[in-house]
Image (cartoon, grey):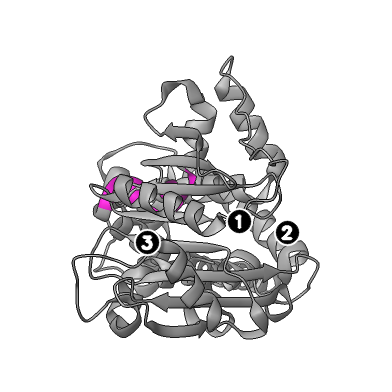
Amino acid sequence: MAVTGCILAFEKELKHALHPEKYFVKTIKKEKLQFSDLKLKAEQVLPDSLKVSRVEISSDPSRSYAFRSLKMNKEALTYWGSYIYYYRVYVDPYTGKVLEVENAKNDFFEIVMDLHRRLLLGEKIGKTITGYSTLILAIMLFSGLVIWFPRKMNKKALKGMFFIKTSAKWKRINYDTHNVLGFYAVIPLCLISYAALIWNFEDVDQWVKKTLNGKAKTEQKAKSTIPTEESSDKKNILNIVGNRVEQSLADKKSALISFPKTEEGTYYAEVTYGNKQYQNEQFNFDQYSGKILKHQSYKDKNIGNGTALRERNYDLHTGSIFGMTGRILYLFAGMIAASLPITGFIIYLNRKKKKSKKKKVKILTPSN
């Protein structure tokens, strides 16, 4: 999980650098096409008359729109069985030209992401294994911190706590590498573990939210009002939603719009201010009228401390809550985490050899 986490640390930046032809348009024009027309363009190139379920928009005028069509099978036991279909369609918002239709199931980073989350073993088995593995990691981090603290505090011990003795023999260097680097990585690794546990264990997630929320009001789910007569103005309503999100996006970074899945479902939009995902505002639009049913910002103090912390979970897990510095530190912490089982196993082997040598000495020593 540590290795895959390191690969995913700068996923977006790598994708944009490797495939600029689908993420960026060649010519920027004054006006974009209507949102409903762009959605139609995306759906026309999808196989089996599939519908899009979400779109990602950037405030960068040179970026394409990324439409997504996804259906999952949570009962499947493998990665490939988990996705019934998963497509991304990249569309030029100025011309409506489809830049690429991507079968996202075969995307390298998507496979790495599933390996990170579920070990390619599906939701039931894979997620359970990674969840309990994270719990074991958290316990080992705390126990390692206890072992790291010296029994006797003096100048020599203090130096050994924070520095690797490079002039020593390789066994000591290996021990110091495990001990010292493990200490430096313990705080980011604890935060990573906490966020992963929240995702993997629903009961823990709910307990943290309820405990920290206190007397904060319970969030009411927004619902669309089903009209008595069938509306034929869906295209115009979609444009109203798209235009409202574009207006809100003007001084921010990106937006996600999820399309309604049920009759009472809403258009859900999440507009992110910058590089920290929790810094966002959320909209729920009635799918039959385009009216805003709910508007909430991360600055809203009435959401409760538990909910506020939960919304920061992704940023806590990736390090983006501390900006670019945090992401880089988390990358190094992930590298250290990947090395700990290796250095730890070498320490174990060395101690095992010592014990076997002592036993041999005892056997060879003549008794009186």
Per the image, is 40 magenta? no
Q: In which quadrant of the rendered view does residue 206 lie? A: top right
- x, y percent for residue 148: 44, 47
- Closer to us: 95 or 14: 95
Residue occupying the point 61% across, 49% down: 199
- Binning the other alpha carbons within 10 Å of mark 3 as few (below 14), some (14 to 19) or many (20 upward) gives many
- Closer to us: 265 or 20: 265
Residue occupying the point 34% across, 48% down: 276
Q: Are marks 1 and 2 in contact (CB under 8 Å)?
A: no
- x, y percent for residue 315: 41, 48
Identify the mark at residue 181; answer none if there is no mark.
Answer: none
- Closer to us: 150 or 28: 28
| Looking at the image, residue 357 lies above or below residue 185 | below
Which residue is tagged 1?
A: 232
Q: Is 316 situated left or right of 112 in this image?
A: left
Q: Can you tell which of label 2 and label 3 is closer to the viewer?
A: 3
Q: Is 301 situated left or right of 121 in this image?
A: left
Which residue is tagged 3?
A: 57
Which residue is tagged 2?
A: 128
Q: CA distance from mark 2 to mark 3?
A: 33 Å
Q: Secondary structure at mark 1?
A: loop
Q: CA distance from mark 1 to mark 2?
A: 45 Å
Q: Which residues are magenta?
A: 313-323
Give the amino acid type for the residue marked by disc 3 in the picture: Ile
